[in-house]
Image (spheres, grey):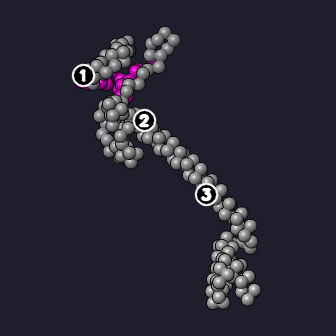
Amino acid sequence: MQLLTTLASALGLGAEADATAIQAAVDKTIKERNDAIAQRNAMLQAAAVATVEEAIGSITAGLAAVDQCRVLTKCVEGLEHDATERERAEIIARIKRDGKCWPVQEVSLFPTLSLDALRTFEKTAPRVRVPGPTEPTRNGDGSPTEAPTWNSKTFAQLKPMERAELRDQNRELYDAMRSHAKATGAL
């Protein structure tokens, strides 16, 4: 009887527990132990290690790798953003260079466009204005070394309508081209 009372106490049962209650508690304890061993073995197998300590090390290393992955992901996102902004600036520069936009579009439209829309704009937009004039190189006395041009034409090659447009857009270049044409006898 003393043995049953000791077993009942060890299993957390009251002193009045009979042999059937003690057997049920022992069976439950054995099942819980076997389940814990099975879970431990499954964890060791999943971690491809032999001991619990090695499994803990693997889990710790895995958590560190996840943190490192988050850091690297943020770095990649930053690099992608920088590359996108660089490409955006290059496309806008080409659009401006090719005369495919008005200054107001650069300020109000381009910031709202996605990169794909900006690429499409660059491919499909017609020329809406004449690209800027080319300024002539100058000698030491300030006179042009070669005939100044506008849209790859000298003053003599410009039609009257083009001359008027040049005069309205860039009076200084117009005067320089006209003076050069008169000085060289091209007019």
Q: Position of residue 127 (x, y in %)?
A: 31, 36
Residue pushed farthest top? Answer: 141
The amino acid type, in three-letter code, at marker 2 is: Ala
In the image, residue 167 above or below residue 100: above
**Residue drawn 65% across the image and 61% down it:** 62
Q: Where is residue 65 in the image (x, y as percent from the top left)?
A: 64, 57
Residue occupied by mark 3 = 66
Q: What element carries label 2?
A: helix
The mark nearer the N terminus, 2 or 3, is 3
The amino acid type, in three-letter code, at marker 1 is: Pro
Front residue of this view, candidates 153 and 87: 87
How far is the residue under mark 2 from the one under mark 3? Answer: 41 Å
- Is 36 a magenta residue? no
Front residue of this view, candidates 57 and 94: 57
Dot in front, 1 or 2: 2
Q: How crowded is mark 2: few (under 14 residues within 10 Å), some or many (20 or more)?
A: few
